[in-house]
Amino acid sequence: IERFAGALETYTIEAMMQNGWALQAGTSHFLGQNFAKAFDVQYSTENEEREHVWATSWGVSTRLLGALIMTHSDDNGLVLPPKVAPVQVVLIPIVKASGGEEVVQCVENLAQKLREGGIRVHVDDRPLRPGNKYYHWERRGVPFRMEIGQRDLKKGTAFCARRNNGAKSPLQIKNEDGSWTDVVSLVNEELESIQRDMLDAATERRDEKTFRLSSYNEMKEKLSKEEYGFFLVPWAADDDNEEKIKADCKATIRCYPLEFQKEAEGKNCFYSGKPATHMAIFARAY
């Protein structure tokens, strides 16, 4: 299993992509004092004594963004979780030849309310057909779209669409007396629901494609049928055997998941038959 050269421990985030392949989304390394001693990096303690620093190294950047994109997106483009989306809500005024001023004013007022409530909003008032605007923002993964036209204005509603599943429904933004509803709370509820549904879908997919196996042949057979996923297996740590498995079926050890290590006790390695030292996740990986 991989360990950063000179590190005492290496930790990793292994993400499962929609096709069951693994992607190392980030790493963190506990370096101890090895590098500090090599380069004589010291600090002063509370007792004014000199000691070598304890160091860490981590890498969480573009790989994590790639994992997010590959985990959630679809054939229509990006699908972004609301918590990290640069634009959470796009407002689209549906303006015809006459009477458009009221619609535009309503959209601007709504945008202001949502911004004051901490929601990241964009108003698309470009002189384009609505369908072109829908396509533009769908490709960019904006979680929630709200459209307001003359008919919506009369009903006090906005017609809304969710990016994650395409569900469409009206949302009441004004009361019968013309006052605003608690529209910030209503939109936040939608965003929280989208966030929760996306996490649930990804978690369900990961769990469905995590296979607990006791023999190497089981894993090899699944891989030959392109039944990809995480293979959680008892493993006797052996670099040579790991290389043999990689050469034979292109699967590699992704990590030793911390929460499952106690399960290795009393089990034999799925490959060598020796007493297991760890529970390991094997997978095909990018």
Image (tube, grey):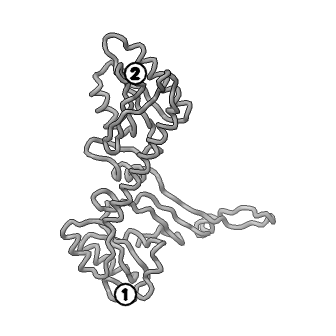
40 left or right, relative to 67: right
Q: Picture quarter containing residue 172?
A: top left
Which residue is depicted at the point 40% across and 85% down? 276
Residue shown at 40% from the left, 89% from the top: 275
Mark carried by residue 153 = 2
Determine the residue positioned at 26% across, 65% down.
228
> x and y percent of residue 80 in the render?
39, 44
Q: Secondary structure at mark 2?
A: helix
Residue 278 position, x and y percent, is 43, 80
- Is the residue 192 above or below the residue 156 in the image? below
Q: Is residue 84 visible?
A: no
Q: Which residue is situated farthest in the left direction here?
A: 225
Q: Is 121 rendered above or below residue 38?
A: above
Disc nearer the start of the sequence (2/1): 2
Question: Which one is in front, 100 or 274?
Answer: 100
Camera-side residue of 253 and 117: 117
Task: Look at 37% across and 12% down and name the residue there.
Answer: 99
Residue topped by disc 1: 268
Q: Residue 231, image x and y in percent?
A: 33, 72
Q: Nearer the viewer, mark 2 or mark 1?
A: 2
